[in-house]
Image: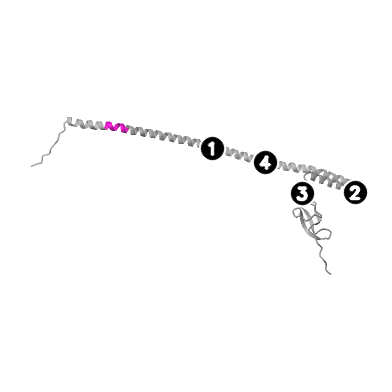
């Protein structure tokens, strides 16, 4: 015999409570979902605000870096201008110093010219000697005004700081190790050696055996 299937029929009255339960559960779940959506929106807004603040800070930092770079470039340009100006001023000072020295020397040429003219007209060697002596004294005076003074060498103990030995000289007239002969006069410029004296240094005469 064929099997019989049991068919259950649910009436509308029985289905209605189930529908109400589902609706109630959906209504109860709605506030939680809305809260989650609201929290997500708040979080998104906060993240957007933070991103905006970071972008603003980055823009400010870039602007500050540009300002510092501009200041650096201006300072570098000012320094280079200062260096050029300093070099120019030093060059001018050197030229002024040279011109001042030349102005001191020019009168010496005048005196030499006068002395030679006087000696030629009169054939007087004494006049020439006087003119040369005048120019020599004038040159010494001009150098002294610049702080130049001669080094006292002959008869002094040899000092390599002030003397340049070019040889030795056997002589009983000077103590051994002293300057026997000054070959070229040396000069000081203030406390600095402008040119050392070139000298011969005295040594004790050797005993000659017969």
Q: Residue at x 77, y 42 (%)?
A: 100
Q: Of callouts 3 and 4, which one flags the residue occurring earlier in the amino acid sequence?
A: 4
Q: Position of residue 148 (x, y in %)?
A: 78, 47
Local secondary structure at mark 2: helix
Quick one: label 3, few (<14), some, or many (20+) residues within 10 Å? Answer: some
Secondary structure beneath disc 3?
Answer: strand
Q: Is residue 100 magenta?
A: no
Quadrant position of the N terminus in the picture: top left
Which residue is under mark 4? 86
Viewer-closest of 71 and 186: 186
What residue is shown with label 3? 188
Residue 36 has which mark?
A: none
Cα distance, mark 4 to mark 1? 30 Å
Q: Are the residues at dot 1 and dot 3 in contact (C-beta closer than 8 Å)?
A: no
Whole-number angstrom distance, CA of label 4 to CA of label 2: 52 Å
Residue 66 marker: 1
Whether residue 114 is situated above or below residue 39 in the rendered picture: below
What residue is shown with label 2?
A: 126
CA gap between label 1 and label 2 equals 81 Å
């Amino acid at each position: 015999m064929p099997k019989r299937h049991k068919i259950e029929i649910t009436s509308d009255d029985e289905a209605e409570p189930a529908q109400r339960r589902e609706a109630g559960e959906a209504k109860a779940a709605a506030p939680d979902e809305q809260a989650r959506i609201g929290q997500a929106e708040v979080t998104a807004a906060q993240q957007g605000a933070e991103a905006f603040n970071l972008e603003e800070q980055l823009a400010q930092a870039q602007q500050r870096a540009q300002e510092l770079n501009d200041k650096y470039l201006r300072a570098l340009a000012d320094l280079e201008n200062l260096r050029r100006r300093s070099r120019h001023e030093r060059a001018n000072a050197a030229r002024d110093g040279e011109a001042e020295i030349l102005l001191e020397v020019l009168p010496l040429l005048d005196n030499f010219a006068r002395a030679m003219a006087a000696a030629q007209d009169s054939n007087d060697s004494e006049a020439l000697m006087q003119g040369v002596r005048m120019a020599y004294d004038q040159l010494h005076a001009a150098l002294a005004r610049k702080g130049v003074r001669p080094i006292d060498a002959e008869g002094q103990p040899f000092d390599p700081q002030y003397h340049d030995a070019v040889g030795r000289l056997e002589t009983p007239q000077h103590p051994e190790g002293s300057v026997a002969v000054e070959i070229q006069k040396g000069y000081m410029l203030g406390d600095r050696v402008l040119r050392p004296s070139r000298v011969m240094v005295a040594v004790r005469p050797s005993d000659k055996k017969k």
